Amino acid sequence: MSAVNDTKLKSVIFLLSGLPGHRDAHLWISIPFCFMYVISIVGNSVILFIVKTDPSLHEPMYIFLSMLAITDLGISITTIPTILGIYLFNSREISLNACLAQLFFIHLFQYIESSVLLLMAFDRFIAIHNPLRYASILTPPRIGKMGLVSVLRAMVLILPLPFLLKRFQYCRANVLSHSYCVHREVMTMACSDIRVNSIYGLFTKLFQMGLDLLLILLSYVMILKTVLSIASYDECLRALNTCVSHLCALLLFYTPEISLSMIHRFGKGSYPLLQILLGYMSLLLPPLMNPIVYSVKSKHLRVRIIRV
């Protein structure tokens, strides 16, 4: 009996979907996707290269930016095979094991990015609240430990998901509405009781992204309190200006993710095209825009990029 179940598990195939359209239309749609992936990978790689090779950029702010670039690269590389496979080669099939591996890494890098954004908010708070001790508080070893804790926390939360999904039997059409695998959608394809997965998925979202967002909001309340106590108007604006890039990164990451979660929880399968677009935005916009935003706002970094 177990051999039959193993055979069923190994033969499970999911069909990925993309934007509606004919095969010829998909070829045209693939052009902006290729363009976005090239910019994302090149932009984040350039930032990593510049921060690594330029000693003057070995500061906490740029070390955290490097962490953000690594997670963005991870998300891009994880989603490239299936998204471009659909639009370039009409390759829609994906095995259960490949699907579980992809969803593991997608959620892992998303959760790590959420933690990195929290660390960057803490970085901005220390820089504004206690600038004289900024470098002594955020030392490279301490930053490394913070990054390691972020990775371990995300991994502990995400690791059970593939194992929880693999124990299910899949006997439906198994047609996914996205061009990649995510937990909430693979879970609904199962012909079993998914209450444990649903509860655990909600718990991980709240414990990771929900808690991170709450602490980020708390950090900015403290930042505003510190900034408003500054007597000089110019210094107040200068302090707030250092947070603009981080605020843009927060909006790019959390806005589509929260919108997508709200639609999945309360939309009951409505607005399918909007769900697809928000799904693409949540995975493609942060890696694409973060290098551009930080390069535009950081004069020091922009000068180094122009030199390269």
Image (spheres, grey):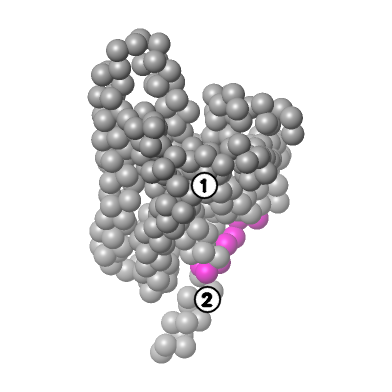
Residue 124 at x, y = what percent? 39, 33
* Residue extending farthest top: 233
Residue 188 at x, y = what percent? 37, 58
* Residue extending farthest right: 308
The magenta stretch spans which residues? 91-97
Whole-Å distance between the Cαs marked 1 and 2? 36 Å
- Left or right position of 43 against 150: right
The answer to whether residue 229 is magenta is no
Judge whether residue 112 can be spotted in this image.
Answer: no
| Mark with earlier residue (1, 2) | 2
Residue 10 marker: 2
- Left or right position of 134 against 88: left
Residue at image location 59% in from the left, 37% down from the top: 57
Within-10-Å neighbours for mark 1: few <14, some 14–19, many 20+: some
Residue 253, quarter of the rendered image? top left
Judge whether residue 93 can be spotted in this image.
Answer: yes
Residue 114 at x, y = what percent? 40, 45
Q: Amino acid at mark 2?
A: Lys
- Left or right position of 50 against 14: right
Residue 106 marker: none
Quadrant, the C terminus: top right
Residue 278 at x, y = what percent? 45, 37
Residue 299, quarter of the rendered image? top right
Q: Single out the mark in the foreground, 1 or 2.
A: 1
The answer to whether residue 92 is magenta is yes
Residue at image location 28% in from the left, 49% down from the top: 206
Residue 67 marker: 1
- Left or right position of 90 against 265: right
